[in-house]
Structure formats: C-alpha cells, structure tokens
Amino acid sequence: MARNTALHFRVVEGRHLPAKDVSGSSDPYCIVKVDNEVVARTATVWKNLNPFWGEEYTLHLPLGFHGLTFYVLDEDTIGHDDVIGKISLSKEQISSHPRGIDSWINLTRVDPNEEVQGEIHLELWVLEEPHRRVLHCHVIEARDLAPRDISGTSDPFARVSCNGQTLETAIIKKTRFPHWDEVLEFDLEERELEKETRGPLLSMEVWDWDMVGKNDFLGQVEFSLDTLQKSPVKGWFRLLPFPNAEEDAGGKLGALRLKVQLAEDRILPSMYYQPLIELLVESILCPAEEEHVTPLAILEEISSVESRQDVAMKLVKIFLGQGLAVPFLDYLNLREVTRTTDPNTLFRSNSLASKSMEQFMKVVGMPYLHEVLKPIINRIFEEKKYVELDPCKIEMNRTRRISFKGSLSEAQVRESSLELLKGYLSDIMESIIGSVEKCPPIMRVAFKHLHKQVEDQFPEAEHEDVKYIAISGFLFLRFFAPAILTPKLFNLRDQHADPRTSRTLLLLAKAVQSIGNLGLQLGHGKEQWMAPLHPFIIPCVSHVKDFLDKLIDVDSENAGEAQPRTLFHPSATIKEGYLHKRKAEGLHLVTRFTFKKRYFWLSSETLSYSKSPEWQVRSSIPIQRICAVERVDENAFQQPHMMQIITQDGEGQLHTMYIQCKNVNELNQWLSAVRKASIYNERMLPSCHPGAFRGSRWTCCLQADRTVHGCSRTHSAVTLGDWSDPLDPDAEAQMVYGQLLLARDKLREKYLELSEARLALEQEEGQEGSYTKEDHERSFQDRRMAATARLLDVIQDLERAHSAFERREKEEAATESY
C-alpha cells in the first residue's frame, strides 16, 4: 500500500511590492521551495510593483512534505538579488482547506534563524549506574544542512544542553553532511528526574562556526526527559527553527495571490480496485441497449462539471492501461453523436466525451505536438517581431524597431504584420499537413472511428463537412491552437511569452482556429480587421480536408493500443535539448573545460546524446540501468543547476554522469522526466552522494572511501505532474472512487427514485399479457437500478478496505510508539 500526495500551486500575482531599485520600481520574481528544495522559479516581471505571473505547477510527493514556501526577490543585473519577503505554508495549514487556498497573503520578513533545513541522526538513552543516572547523547551525523558560507557549505557543530549543562561536538569544516560519531554524557540528579517537567529538558542545536562574527544557527530539536526515561530514542530528526511567530509586516512588504491545494490519497493494493475497473470496462465491452444504464453513463451524470476534466483524465489512463482507450472513446463519442440533433452543437459542451478526447490527445499526442510545433514556436520567441492587425491596438512608438528608416505609417505596420503572420502561418500549416505519419496510430484510429460515427449520424449532403469538423474541432481547436496560444502549458517553452510575442501567438491561434472551423465563420465575427488573412485561410481548408482524409486512412487492426505503463511508443522522444555534460576523465582540468555542450534525447528506452541534433554518432544509456537521478550540490564543481545520473553496469559497478542545466526550471524538468522514465526500475538506490569524489574524498560528507554509502536520501518518485506522468491504474482508480464517494448520496437518491418508479409501474400494470410500453420501461428501470446498486456496492467495499487499512496503520503506529 502506498500514499499518493500531489501538491498543486499557482503563483497568480503580486501587489504593492516595495521598490528595491533606484528607479523607484522592482524586477520581481518568485522562488518556490518544498522543504527547502527549490522546485520552481517564475519569470521576472521587469519594472513592476504589481506583477502578474499566472504560473502553476503540480508536484508528486510520495513521501509527503512539511512545508511550502514562496520567496519574492528583486532581480539585479549586478550583485546579489534583493530578498523582498516570503510566505510560508505548513502542510497542516494547506490540509485544513480541503477545497484549496485561493487568497491574497501578506509577505513576511526573511529571518536567517528561520531558514533552517536538514536532519540530525541521534541516539539517546538514560543509563542507570551506581549512585547516579547518566544521559548518553550519541550525536552520529547530520544531512542536508543549510549552506551558510559563501562556498555553499557550512562548518557545523552540535551544542547539547540538559539541566544547566552544555556540551559541544567537534567542528566539521566545509560540509553540509557532517559525521561526528561522538557520545556526550550528562549527569542527571534524582530531584531533576522526579520533579514535574514543564517542557523539553534536552535541547540539541546545530550551529555554523564562523571565525569572524557570530555563529549562524542551523536548527534545533528538543526532547522531553520523561520520554527518554521510558525508552531509548534513535533515528533521524528534522531540525526546526527557534519558536517565533511570523509577522506579516502589516502588508508593508506587499502580498501575493496564491492558489494551493493538497490531494492526499491512500492507494490500496490493486486487487481492491479490480471490481471497479471491471465495472467500468464492462460498460464498453458489454454496452446495454439503453445508453443511460451503464455504470460509465451514471458516473458522467453524477460527476460535477468542475471535476469532469480530472475524471476524464483518469478514465483515459485507466483504459489506456487496459488497452481499451479506443473502445472507451468510441463508446462516449457514440453516445454524444446519437444524442445530437443539430450538427452545429456537436461536441460543443463540456461533456465527458469531449473532455476525454481532449485529455486523450494531451496524454498520447504530446510528443507529436512537440515535433510539429516546437521549431516554429521557438523561432517566434527568438525573433520577437512586432505584429498587429487591429488598428485600435497599433502602437506607433514601437514601429521604429521595425525599420531603420524611421517610423512607419499604420498601413505599413499592418502590411508588415500581415506578411509576418502569413509566413509563420504557412510554416505552421505546412508542418501540420505534413505530419500524417508522425501522428500516433492510436490517435488516428480514434479519429477514424469518430469520422465514421458522425458520417452515419449526419449522412445528408448539406452536412458533408460535419465529419471533418468533428475531427478538426479536437485536433485544431483543442490541441494545436491552445498550444500555440500558451506554449508553456504544453511544455513547448519554459516561460510564458512576453506581451509582444504573446500578441503574435494570439493572432496565429485565431487563424488556426478559423482553419480548423473550415472557414465557416469567416466574415461573421466582430474582428473584421482579421479579414486580410482570409485569402490565406480559405485555400488552407481544402488542404486540411486532404490531411484529415490521409490521417484516418489507417488500419485499425494493426495500430495497436498503448501497453500498460506506457503512453506512447518506447522510442518516442519524451524530452530533448542542449545540456552540458561533464567529462569523466577531466579530473585535473579547470572546471569550465570539463563541461561539454551536448544534445540530449530522452525516451522510455534510452537517454542518448551527441554533439548536435544532426550528429550521426550517439552515445546511449539504457533507461533500465539507471538507479538514481539526483541534484548535485553547487560546491561540488562550483557550478549551479547540476544533476547526476547514476547507472549500474552488468557487473554491478556504479557509474555517474554529471549534467548541468541552464536554470532551475530546466533542472527540475529533466530530473522529473528521467525519474518518470526510470520509476519502475528494480535497482533504485535508497541513498547517494549529492557531491562529487574529488581530491581523494567526497565533497559532501568528506568521507575518503569512494564506495561508502550515500550520505543523502534519494528522491526517485518526486516528480513534476504533466502529460508524461506514467500510467498508474491504482492511483487513477482511487481518484474515480473518490468522485463516486462524493456523489454517494446522489446515487442513493437515484436508487430510491428508481425503486419508487418501479413500484408505481407495477401498481399501474394492465391485465393484458402482451408486451407493453410499461414492460419496456420496467426493464429499463431494472437495469438502471442494477447498475446503480453495483456502483454503491463497489463504493462500500472500497470504503471498508480503506477503514481496515487505516485501523491497521493506527495500530502499527501505536505499537512503534510503545
């Protein structure tokens, strides 16, 4: 049994931030930490005291966490960035808001004594000796301490205080992972043990020693002497700051608007979810004559509009894992199509069918989307051209950058913008239309079946285009166009676009939408200033139809479903880009010469690299050999944003490759991507060294033995939530169960209504023996009652299983405590 912890947070905006620059403004950005590990950095908003970011993230944290902290800083070109303030949220605070936090929160000052992190390994016991009692305090080691020195390390020592006595360990210099292995002894007087204690009597503090000035506080942990008398204590203990209530400075430091939500689930063993999955699968493999009587149909009825997207995503992944994604979509799409009488309203609502198709494309088709759009999106971001067609929005002062001959007239600006848009749009459409063979076969089969269903429902000549619009409405309007509009949300870019580029992307997305609508709405909208693009859009319509005809020309039998735990072909590229790889043989070279720029490709089978994307010779690492993917301390090579990939060869030898990324977001993305690809490997390491073995010792823990066990825990399952999340049928079934549990009262009400309606039919039943309309209605009610009852039974069984495991957890915790 496992726990599934997902932390969703969005940094929306800031207000009334203080000015940190001489210009009277600031250049703010946010750093987000989970338990003092940087997980995200927002873009910098230049010269703005009321910045808008709108950046959101999801973190998978299987081992849980303690706190989430948002820091606001002012970026400076020269010198260190200025810290403006912070917001700290404990896990308990976030958990107390089941629907999530969505509010403005004032920033507080950053106190160095509160910026503590790490754990200390202790063993404490009281020993009875003749005529005295002795408290033995074995200070073994510490890990992941806060760096207090400019070198990125600390010089830690431990200070232990008990009943007026204070003893200290030795100082271990230049490390965040000190190993003391010292036993400190304290004499305990009888009267001290017998009197009532009013708080902790033993205090363990960790400090950073400084030759000049005051020592820096690194954290503390406290114990009650009564607890130590009853039983010895041994283990790792989290270091905490001095007790000090944070003050919000009365809003003087400004505020952030944050959205934070914690989703925590207990994941039961697979056998407990099997009845639920079988019930859902039965809906599509053995559909009832009436479309409303299957468990899947009932699930759609009881799920709220707000949760429908999440439900759709989980169902898509469940059926992908079962190898039944296409039958699942066929079932939902057929229900939607047969219920639609006006073809203009087909798939226009937020039904489970439309949401499932949308999520299906994101889950299965993201590598395809990247291959089609990423080169063009990158070029648009790099060129930063000024593009505008709306006369009301043309800013003449910006046009000077377009021409060296002075300002252009409004007509010239529109003409220049039109040519740029046509150029970009031509490249986009050429890439899309030429991508038939790149599209995943499973997507093509789903579109083929949808095309047939719509054609059968609307066979009339005047509805000739409906079967094309049904596909293009998903592929263009809900896939390509949104990705062009907001590339960051589709992982096409690391940051949101600046205002100029964002406007260009918006105009291109509008044009792609018009093409996806097969030009049917051209000239009918309010944006008549888009008319100059119509002569380009109209010829594209016939090309799109040809493209769709080729797209659905696929053999349904041979285009197999994705296998469990995979979302796309094993050789499909999940992530790629330039990184800096450290040369293993360059131990004695100057640091900057030991790193070489290489282009990396990651698939679910291999991590490969070469000198450039075009280079024919590639080096490859099989994913199955990876046993750890972790961060590297900055002091290891005096380089930031570094990670290590540890592999094991056939003889059991470990090998480490060090990689440098350009920023913290790229580092987190690569860490997450490689961890997801290797998450099911059997030989994952429980610990590793966050430093490097240099100068005959590890830079992290200073151990001289190269083969000594790692001094820090690994984080193999800590990942960013996105389209590349691996399939996890148990976690997905648990989410569906959660939705059913929320709607249990509604299900019970439906069951009672059906029972009453069934009883009324029996009372009104005629004396004729022939089959009547009432007989048909009664049969329908019976089947619907049966489906509802089975769902209620599944909910009850899972609820009992959760209760049993919860009781077992409490009993085990009580036993350990005893």
Image (tube, rainbow, N blue to C red):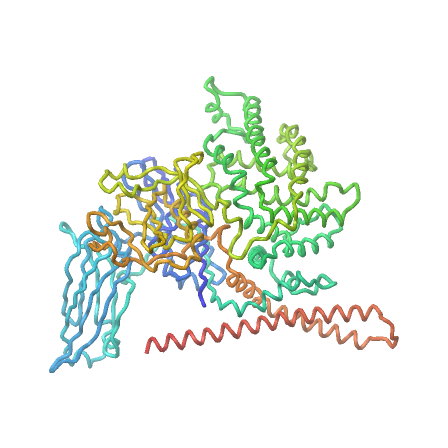
In the foreground, 618 or 172 = 618
Which residue is most to the left? 131
Quadrant of the image containing the C terminus: bottom left
Q: Tally the numbered discs.
A: 0
Q: Is residue 303 left or right of residue 581?
A: right
Q: Position of residue 592 (x, y in %)?
A: 27, 37
Q: Position of residue 331 (x, y in %)?
A: 67, 56
Please tell me whether residue 356 is drawn above or below residue 20 in the rendered image: below
Q: Is residue 419 left or right of residue 54?
A: right
In the foreground, 142 or 330 = 330
Q: Examine the image and state in which quarter residue 591 appears.
A: top left
The residue positioned 13% from the left and 75% from the top of the image is 187
The residue positioned 71% from the left and 71% from the top of the image is 754
Q: Is residue 558 left or right of residue 581?
A: right
Q: Position of residue 424 (x, y in %)?
A: 55, 31
Q: Does residue 48 show up?
A: no
Which residue is most to the front? 651
Q: Is residue 304 left or right of residue 334?
A: left
